[in-house]
Amino acid sequence: MIDKSRQEILQRLDVIEKQVRAIREAIGRVEPVFPTEAEKKYAKRICLDCGKHAEIPYCPLECLSQQIESDTGYAIVSHKIDLYGYCADCQKKKTRT
């Protein structure tokens, strides 16, 4: 389990990675800066109480991304969705108290 502060640091690093990649592309240096795993499209859910997180086995934005690419010609290489809420275990704990 990752605590909330570590999770926040990882999220901020992900943003920095994307900014560096965009800058390098803008100045014509498109060689990989970070592992291509950082470019994968994914969604995950994160519990606000216990910090438990898990990837969602499908990406709810995939169809929307394809439509945006089709409509605009923009090539989307990465996106990320984090859904925050309360896991089933934490919900049960709250209803007991």
Image (cartoon, grey):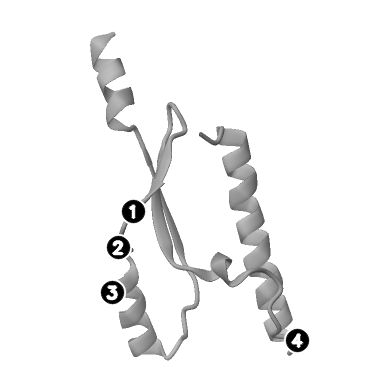
| Residue located 66% across and 55% down the image | 13
For residue 88, which quarter of the picture?
top left
Q: Nearer the viewer, residue 27 or 33?
A: 33
Q: Earlier in the sequence, mark 1 or mark 3?
A: 1
SS under mark 4: loop
Q: Is residue 16 left or right of residue 88?
A: right
The residue tagged 1 is 56
Q: Which amino acid is tagged 2? A: Pro
The residue tagged 4 is 27
Quadrant placement of the C terminus: top left
* CA distance for labels 3 and 2: 7 Å
* CA distance for labels 1 and 4: 35 Å
Q: Is 85 drawn above or below residue 54 in the view shown?
A: above
Q: Residue furthest top?
A: 97
Q: Which amino acid is tagged 3? A: Cys
Q: Nearer the viewer, mark 1 or mark 4?
A: 1
Q: Which amino acid is tagged 1? A: Ile
x then y, percent, for residue 89: 30, 25
Q: Nearer the viewer, residue 26 or 4?
A: 4
- Mark 2 burial class by Cα count in 10 Å: few <14, some 14-19, many 20+: few
Q: Is 44 drawn above or below residue 33 in the view shown?
A: above
The residue tagged 3 is 63
* CA distance for labels 3 and 4: 31 Å
The residue tagged 2 is 60
Q: Earlier in the sequence, mark 3 or mark 4?
A: 4
Q: Is 45 drawn above or below residue 27 in the view shown?
A: above
Q: Earlier in the sequence, mark 1 or mark 4?
A: 4
Q: Nearer the viewer, mark 2 or mark 4?
A: 2
Q: Nearer the viewer, mark 2 or mark 1?
A: 1
